[in-house]
Amino acid sequence: MKETNIKNAERTLTITTTLTLFVAGFEVLMAYLNFKPGMNFLDIASYANANIRIYCLILILINLIILPGAVMLFRQNGISKKKEITEKKTLGKDILYGIAALSVTTLFSLVYTLILSGRTELAYTNHDISAETTIIKIIALTFVSGICKEIYFRGLAKKFCGPVLGETQALLLFNIMFAMLDWYNMGFSFVAGLVWIFVYKKTGHLLPGMIAHGGANLIATIYVILTSGVV
């Protein structure tokens, strides 16, 4: 096994574990600080990103910090990041796969809403749906998270850990890390990640997963606004 492959895999793991530990650590801290006796796990998890503005700003900041390292990894290995995302000749196909993956992900989210019915009155419900917060959420979750996480947990996993662990094994391992980062959504990210892995392997491009990932987060943002009784 080439030494370069091992070093690339190590750098990839550093990037993804940094993001996972930093963001998940903040989520755990928020849940811990808001703990009240009588809460079930769903109630505790609801506070993971209760301070949504700070959460989104942290998400934007940490992604901006680690993204250059991911870009450099592609560049140093002669891999075109643009072609990894999509190519002109396959753009239409990639978009269609992205829309299909988003539809499947949305169906899974309906099951997730049923799980949330297990929350009690101690769960967090005071969602900030102000215009400023909504804009920050769209930037952080739809664009930054939807694009960057697909690069880290799918693109880096396949290209740089795949040669060491095997492509499928690497993608599954990184999907577990992806689910750990979003532990508060009770495994929804893991299931959704499997869908995005499928379209990535099917098309060879990250754009379908980015469309599905960012679109799912946008739909979730709209759902929170609609269920808050403001519109």
Image (cartoon, rainbow, N blue to C red):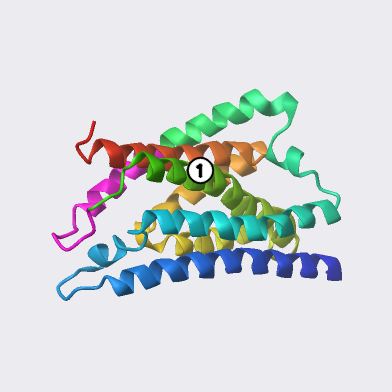
Nearer to the camera, 165 or 19: 19
Nearer to the camera, 45 or 200: 45
Residue 72 in sight here: yes
Crowding near the residue tagged with mark 1, few <14, some 14–19, many ≥20 C-alpha atoms within 10 Å: some
* Picture quadrant of residue 204: top right
Quarter of the image with the N terminus in it: bottom right
**What percent of the width, then of the height, locates residue 229?**
19, 37
**What percent of the width, then of the height, locates residue 17?**
59, 68
Specify start and end residues of the magenta stretch as a single range.
Answer: 105-125
Quarter of the image with the C terminus in it: top left
Residue 2 in sight here: no
* Residue 92 magenta: no
* Picture quadrant of residue 218: top left
Q: Residue at x 21, y 60 (%)?
A: 123
| Residue annotated with mark 1 | 139
**What percent of the width, then of the height, locates residue 143?**
54, 42
* Residue 112 magenta: yes
**What percent of the width, then of the height, locates residue 125?**
22, 53
Find numbered disc 1 in the image and state the secondary structure of the residue it sits on.
Answer: helix
Q: Residue at x 66, y 69 (%)?
A: 14
Q: Residue at x 37, y 41 (%)?
A: 221
